Image (cartoon, rainbow, N blue to C red):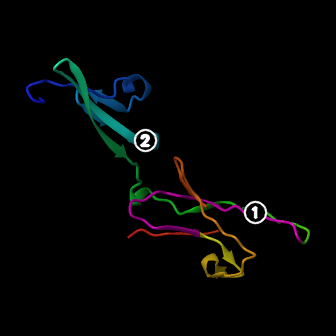
Amino acid sequence: RFGGYFPRVSGPRDLKGRYPDRIPNGLNLTFAIVETAYEGEYTCVASYRENGRDFSLTRTMRVKVVESPEKSTPPVIISPTKWITYELKPGEQLFLHCEVTFTFLKDSPQEVWWAIDGRHSDDITDFKFNVSTTVISHDLQLEFCAAKTSVT
């Protein structure tokens, strides 16, 4: 109730048919089985009319799906495979791509790096190398070839 006016609250109206594991029930939204695809923002909207004008209040929550440590799997290097050999002529440019999948564990550090001649790429001051890192979030957490994760 806002200043003597009763709000109309909108929730996830169309979830029931499209997403059977997310069950709207009045002002509650139940996740019967949490799926990675259900990550995202969920907004509760309260609308009301006062003095002939319509108003809306919103509150948005972010849902993030994390794995339990019992279900975690070791990181896997997807690319490059150990069978790739690059043959180039002197002066040609080469872009190496490293792709690693991790099980996302809450508060678990994840590191991916290139080792160049046995040294961490951060320790290389030779400007012949340019190492960049990109993080792409998908259903599996992908990161851009050494990989390490830890669970405490």
User: With 44 as the anchor, is 37 left or right in this view?
Assistant: right
In the image, is residue 95 part of the stretch drawn in magenta?
Answer: yes
Write down the region rendered in magenta.
Answer: 91-112
In the image, is residue 100 part of the stretch drawn in magenta?
Answer: yes
- The amino acid pointed to by label 1 is Phe
Write the residue at 53% across / 63% down. Answer: 74
Q: Residue furthest top?
A: 52
Write the residue at 45% across / 67% down. Answer: 109
Crowdedness of circle 1 by 10 Å Cα count: few (<14), some, many (20+)?
few
Residue 24 appears in which quarter of the rendering? top left
User: With 102 as the anchor, is 115 left or right in this view?
Assistant: right
Q: Is any part of residue 33 visible from this angle? A: no
Q: Looking at the picture, does residue 13 appear above or below residue 147?
A: above
Q: CA distance from mark 2 to mark 1?
A: 35 Å
User: Which SS type dominates the magenta stretch?
Assistant: loop
| Tag 2 residue | 35
Q: In the structure shown, which secondary structural element does the residue marked by tag 2 occupy?
A: loop
Give the number of the disc on residue 95. 1
Q: Nearer the viewer, mark 2 or mark 1?
A: 1
Q: Position of residue 119 (x, y in %)?
A: 65, 82
